[in-house]
Every structure is written in C-alpha cells, then in structure tokens.
C-alpha cells in the first residue's frame, strides 16, 4: 500500500491559475468536450494514423508525470507505484483499472469503467466491430505509466485496444507489450512557458472573484467509488493533463496541413473553435445551472455582466489560467486578458507551433457571451439541447472572438475581444 | 414546487426543481430514507454553504442542492426520466409537508443570517 493519496498530489497554484499533478498542469473538462475533440480528430483516420496523436501524446504526458512523482516522492517499490497510478487514474475521473497483472514486459488490462468508452456507449450509437475502440487516452496514459513504473525509457511500451464498450463488449481491454525499438515520442512540455498573474477584482461588481475561485477549488469533484467516474454539474468530468488537449489539437493541425495542404487550415481551426463552443455550452453551461453555482456564485449575481465575472472567477479554479476582464463587458463586446492560459502556455514551449493563438479560447469566450447575452441565462433557466446549441452556435451564431494580442505571436499576454460579429 | 427540464442528451436529462425554501439537512436525510437505498453526501464549502448530493440506487441518478438555494438539480437516465422524476417529486412533496413550517429551518440549520 502506498502512503501517498492521489489527492495529496494535487497542487493548486493560485498565482498561475493552474493545478499541477506531478508537474503536469491538469484541467477540468466534461465528456461532451472530450468526445467532440477526440471524434473530430478521429474523423481524420483515413488521412493519417490518428493513434499517433491520440495515444502517443497521452503516453508522453503520463510518462513525465509519473516519473516526476516517483522521483520526487521517493517511491521505488513497483507495487506502490502501481497502486498510486490506479489511485490517480480514478481520482482524475478516468475510471477504474488494476495494474496487478502488468509486468515490465507489459500485459493486459480490462475494465468496465473508462471515461471515454463509458460515456460514449451511453450517449452515442454503437460503433461497428471493425472500428477500433474509443479509449485512446487511457491506452496511452497507461502505457506511459507502465514505462514510468519500471523505469523504462519513453516510447518503450507499445499498446493496442482490443475490446470496447462502444462495440457491445462488456469491458474495455488493452494489451501492452515491450517494443524492440522506441516509439518516436517527445518528452512532455510539462508546465510549458508558465506565467503568473492576478485575479483582478473589478470595481463595478459585488462578485467576489477570489472568494469564488477559492470556494470552487474546494468543491468535491470526487469520483464515484464504484466507477471512478466524476459526476458533477449534470456532466461527467475529467481532470485531464492540459498538455494532452493542447498537443493533440496542435499535432492534428500540423498533420492535416502536412498531408492535405494549406487549404485545410481554416477547416481545422473552425473545428477547434467549435470545441470551445461545445465546452462553453456543456461544461460552463452545466456549471451555471448547478447546485454548486447556486451555493458559491449565484448569491452575488445582480446583472448579466455579473454572470461573466462569476464564470471568469471559476476558470482558474479548474486549471485553465487567469481571466482578467479589461473593462466591463456588455452585450456588444467583452475585452479580456488571459494570463497563463493553459493552451497558450503549452504551445509557447514548443519550438515552432503551427497554431499562433488559442482557437479553443476563441470558441469558449464567444460561447460565454452567447450563453449570457443571446440565450439570456441570467434571466431564465435554459434547456441545453440540440435546439439551443443550433440557436447559439450554428445558424443563430452572432458572437465571435478575435485575438488582439497573442503570446504565440510575441505578445506578453493573450488579449481578446469577444463581440457581436459577422459570422 | 416547479420542475423543468434544463438539459437533455441521448443518455440523460437534467431537471431543475424549484422549492419555496432550501431543503434543510433534516429534510435531506428524510428524503434519503424515503427513497430507499441511496447515498447522501454533504460538503461544507469555504463560503459556509452546505452542498448536498443524494445518489439514487441502481444508477437512477443524482439530486443535488445547497443550503443557500431553493433550487435542486436532478440528473437521471433519459429513458426512465418520467418515472424517476414523478417519484422524486412525490417524495419531495411528502418530505416538505411532513417537516412542518419551513421557515423554522431544519436540524442542521440552513440559516445564513
């Protein structure tokens, strides 16, 4: 038994708006966002081998974070290491796994509870048997963890998913095996080009920004003890390494341009912006209509602008970075500044990122404007369904976000304006 | 007591149930008892509010609420939603009626003033 608990490894950094586990920034997202992003990338499987993005990136991140934890905490015993991996896997809402059958040569793992597979099977129609399963992230994460457990170099464990809930199988199953040659993986960027900032208290509101951030940090985002899945806000949450999201977006963007050409650039960017809409709608919309919101934020909300301040105070508590409202938002425009935005911070650490701004942020902040000013979440309760999504983000879309300054183009910070636009 | 659907997908539906007052701790415990084998968790947040989460048995969903809001949120499987919500509303009504004058608050005290 390990003496460390997974919870004790979680380190909030208020000055960065980040949450570190094993030196890796972790961010909270919901299953709708996770599936949208993964499925959008998976759709390119006929264009390039998407496993190299979806699995290998998770392997890089997990290898780094567990190696850091084992080294810093002085954990040398293989069984203790396995126990900690199992515990952290559940604590982050990925599901439940047992590594008892795993050796330095690999082995098989099977589970009925894995975030991507479980929520996909519950939400979407079954996938055909010939298609592979959806548990890419866990496959890579576990492969990287096995390498770290046995002090193997990054890229020495190969993997495949051999069964999936999405195809009618009773469990998700993966096979792991030692490779004779290392996979061409890159070490994680870890904290990236992290920067610090301050959660500014606007003068024109009684929304207590720091108090809300701190209360949200204390919210019990605990996994169900039976499933290892985190149910909150009406969605299923994960606390996943932010570098995973950023790097699969960046690498997909790069691969698509390499293989298809420049003409695909805007198509992929639009998909990544759309992922921000999906996140605003499901994750943030779910938060803004929840008992947690009512307990922590709702008592201070007098105006629609207060809803924007309130959700801005939540974001650093889920690890996304610090949002500073440069001036009072209105239904016409919202000027904001981002410090240590997780996507930017990871991209800024890459030698030559293809993305020159955070497309996720573009979609997200336009999405918040749409929820507050178009849908009117401050005035009435909303029904989050396909009809509302189309009204806000498809034929009825009226908000867009532009970057006025980007750290990825030499700026000191990310400066954005979400506004009514010609979409 | 008002109930409206606020989120729906192929898997689950989320309902907002508006009461006249926040449920007291006593009423949450009573609700747990009347709904059978379910788990009740409560968390005291840093702002002093108490967050309640009732997990229904057999994967039938969750009911959450807080000490400073009369609104409750039920997340239930979509295919069984009508039956579960009907049962939930009936039990809520019964619990609220049986605990008497709500303005007096419950055993754990919901007064923040």
Image (cartoon, helix red, strand yellow):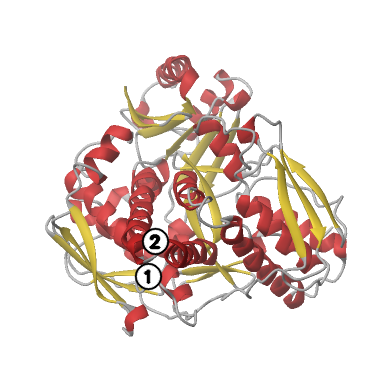
Q: Position of residue A168 (x, y in %)?
A: 65, 29
Q: Please say if A288 is above or below A249.
A: above
Q: Please say if A407 is above or below A17.
A: below
Q: Which mark is residue A322?
A: 1
Residue A403 lies in quadrant = bottom left
Mark 1 or mark 2: name the one nearer the start of the chain.
2
| Residue that appears at 66% across and 63% down | A59
Q: Is residue A6 left or right of residue B28?
A: right
Q: Position of residue A294 (x, y in %)?
A: 36, 44
Q: On what subunit does the disc labeled 1 rest?
A: A
- The reply to whether the C-beta atoms of the residues labelled 1 and 2 are less than 8 Å apart is yes
Q: Is residue A381 left or right of residue B52?
A: left
Q: Position of residue B87 (x, y in %)?
A: 47, 15
Residue B20 lies in quadrant = top left
**Circle 1 SS class:** strand
Q: On what subunit does the disc labeled 2 rest?
A: A
| Residue that appears at 44% across and 58% down | A215
Name the residue nearer the viewer: A152 or A185.
A185
| Residue that appears at 49% across and 39% down | B52
Q: Is residue B112 visible?
A: no
Label 1, label 2: how far apart the Cα atoms are: 7 Å
Q: Which mark is residue A315?
A: 2
Quadrant where the N terminus of chain A sits is bottom right
Q: Position of residue A379 (x, y in %)?
A: 19, 41
């Amino acid at each position: 038994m390990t003496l460390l608990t997974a919870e004790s490894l979680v380190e909030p950094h208020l000055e960065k708006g980040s949450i570190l586990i094993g030196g890796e920034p972790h961010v909270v997202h919901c299953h709708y966002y996770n599936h949208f992003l993964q499925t959008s990338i998976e759709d390119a499987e006929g264009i390039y081998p998407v496993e190299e993005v979806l699995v290998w990136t998770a392997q890089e991140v997990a290898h780094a974070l567990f190696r850091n934890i084992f080294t810093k905490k002085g954990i040398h015993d293989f069984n203790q290491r396995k126990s900690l991996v199992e515990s952290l896997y559940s604590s982050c809402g990925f599901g439940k796994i047992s590594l008892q059958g795993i050796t330095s040569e690999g082995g098989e793992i099977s589970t009925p509870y894995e975030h991507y597979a479980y929520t996909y099977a519950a939400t979407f129609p079954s996938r055909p048997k010939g298609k592979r399963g959806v548990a890419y992230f866990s496959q890579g994460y576990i492969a990287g963890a096995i390498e770290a457990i046995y002090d193997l170099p990054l890229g020495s464990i190969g993997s495949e998913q051999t069964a999936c809930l999405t195809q009618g199988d009773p469990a998700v199953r993966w096979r792991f095996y030692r490779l004779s040659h290392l996979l061409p993986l890159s070490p994680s960027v870890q904290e990236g080009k992290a920067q610090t900032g301050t959660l500014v208290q606007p003068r024109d509101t009684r929304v207590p920004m720091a108090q809300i951030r701190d209360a949200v940090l204390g919210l019990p985002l605990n996994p169900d003890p039976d499933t290892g899945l985190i149910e909150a806000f009406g969605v299923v949450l994960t606390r996943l390494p932010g570098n995973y999201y950023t790097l699969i977006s960046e690498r997909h963007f790069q691969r698509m341009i390499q293989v298809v050409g420049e003409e695909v650039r805007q198509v992929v960017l639009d998909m990544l912006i759309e992922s921000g809409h999906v996140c605003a709608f499901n994750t943030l919309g779910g938060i803004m209509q929840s008992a947690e919101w009512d307990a922590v934020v709702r008592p201070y909300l007098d105006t629609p602008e207060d809803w924007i301040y309130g959700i801005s105070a939540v974001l650093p508590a889920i690890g996304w970075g610090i949002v500073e409202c440069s001036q009072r938002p209105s239904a016409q425009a919202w000027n904001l500044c981002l410090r240590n935005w997780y996507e930017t911070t990871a991209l800024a650490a890459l030698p030559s990122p293809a993305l020159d701004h955070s497309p996720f942020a573009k979609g997200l902040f336009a999405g918040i404007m749409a929820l507050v000013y178009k849908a009117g979440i401050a005035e009435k309760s909303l029904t989050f369904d396909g009809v509302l999504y189309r009204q806000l983000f498809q034929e009825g879309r009226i908000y867009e976000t532009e970057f006025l300054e980007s750290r990825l183009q030499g700026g000191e910070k990310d400066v954005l304006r979400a506004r009514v636009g010609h979409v | 007591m008002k109930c409206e659907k606020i989120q729906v997908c192929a898997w689950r539906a989320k309902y907002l149930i508006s009461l006249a007052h926040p449920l007291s701790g006593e009423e949450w415990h009573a609700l747990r008892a009347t709904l059978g084998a379910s788990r009740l968790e409560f968390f005291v947040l840093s702002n002093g509010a108490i967050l309640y989460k009732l997990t229904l048995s057999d994967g039938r969903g969750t009911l959450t609420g807080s000490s400073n809001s009369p609104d409750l949120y039920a997340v239930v499987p979509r295919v069984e939603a009508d039956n579960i919500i009907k049962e939930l509303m009936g039990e809520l009504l019964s619990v609220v009626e049986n605990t008497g004058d709500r303005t007096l608050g419950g055993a754990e005290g919901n007064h923040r003033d």
